Image (tube, rainbow, N blue to C red):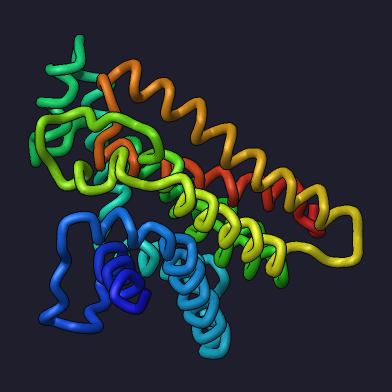
Amino acid sequence: MIKNFITALQFLTIFTVKKNHTVEEGDLAKSMVYFPVIGFLIGLLLVYADKVFELIVLPQTIATFLVIILSVLITRALHVDGLADTLDGLMGGRDHQSRLAIMKDSRIGTAGVIGILGTLFMKYLCLNNLFAIDRVGALLIAPMLGRWSQAFMVYQANYGREEGMGRAFVGHLRSGSMLAVSLIAVCLSAFVVLRLDLRSVFLFFSLITGVLLLTFLGKRYLVHKLGGVTGDAIGAISELNEVLVFLIFIVFSSES
């Protein structure tokens, strides 16, 4: 249990708990049960960082910018890089193989740059228009549900390449683990969002339904375009779901 948690933490973030931590075959897939927990911890770190920026009396616009940058640094830009590679492949390729070849290229194209800037700017705009409990809730839930969607991307899926980092995940998540990761994500979301009012109930169900729908449609589209799920595709859907969570919070914001 602890080993899988450490595996998830060290894979998803810049933090190293054990330098000599060994990962055996199958450990990465097993660690996905803890992905929403790691996402929640990332969100918690962002919330406290945001509070620190507030205490030193930074303007909200600057604090928001720093929080967004911190969210990228914590994850080693793993998922925004996947988003950029996926967009480059989709925009530049004509078939499965050409798209996958473009995505494997370490150079970033125009579509990738636009995708990264657009995603980060949308997060910035949303977060800059959220206040108090809504701001805290969005920071906690966006990274958590984004990691939840990664589990749905690999569940009962075929890997789009012959080899790659994503092969250790795709298709290896068992049904019991999928149920566990979903229960964790839903319970954490309920803990953060649900209050004794109708607005929070609608917000909760909109978040869960929205992430499920976007992940389902995104997975089908990417499988059609790429011939399977790849690590980059997982990262892309995770980033898009984070944006979706921010947008849903904006729609239900008590300030709107």
Left or right of 119? Residue 55 is right
* Spot occupied by residue 211 in the image (x, y as percentages of width and height): 57, 42
Q: Is residue 87 above or below residue 127?
A: above
Does 211 sit left or right of 71 as displayed?
Answer: right
Between 119 and 228, the one nearer to me in the picture = 228
Residue drawn where x is 13% and y is 81% of the image = 19
Q: Is residue 175 visible?
A: yes
Question: What residue is drawn where x is 81% and y is 48%?
Answer: 202
Judged left or right of residue 38, residue 190 is right
Q: How many numbered marks are there?
A: 0
Q: Nearer the viewer, residue 193 or 121?
A: 193
- Residue lying at the far bottom in this picture: please name it: 55
Q: Position of residue 43 (x, y in %)?
A: 50, 69
Using the image as rendered, state which of residue 127 and residue 220 is in the foreground.
Answer: 220
Regarding residue 113, the answer to whether it shows in the image is no
For this orientation, the residue located farthest to the top is: 94
Write the residue at 37% across / 69% down. 70
Q: In the displayed structure, would residue 88 be above or below residue 237? A: above
Q: Position of residue 65 (x, y in %)?
A: 44, 64
- Judged left or right of residue 210, residue 174 is left
Residue drawn at (51%, 60%), measured in percent from left and top?
144
Which quadrant holds the N terminus?
Answer: bottom left
Q: Position of residue 166 (x, y in %)?
A: 22, 44
Among the 4 quarters of the image, the one containing residue 119: top left
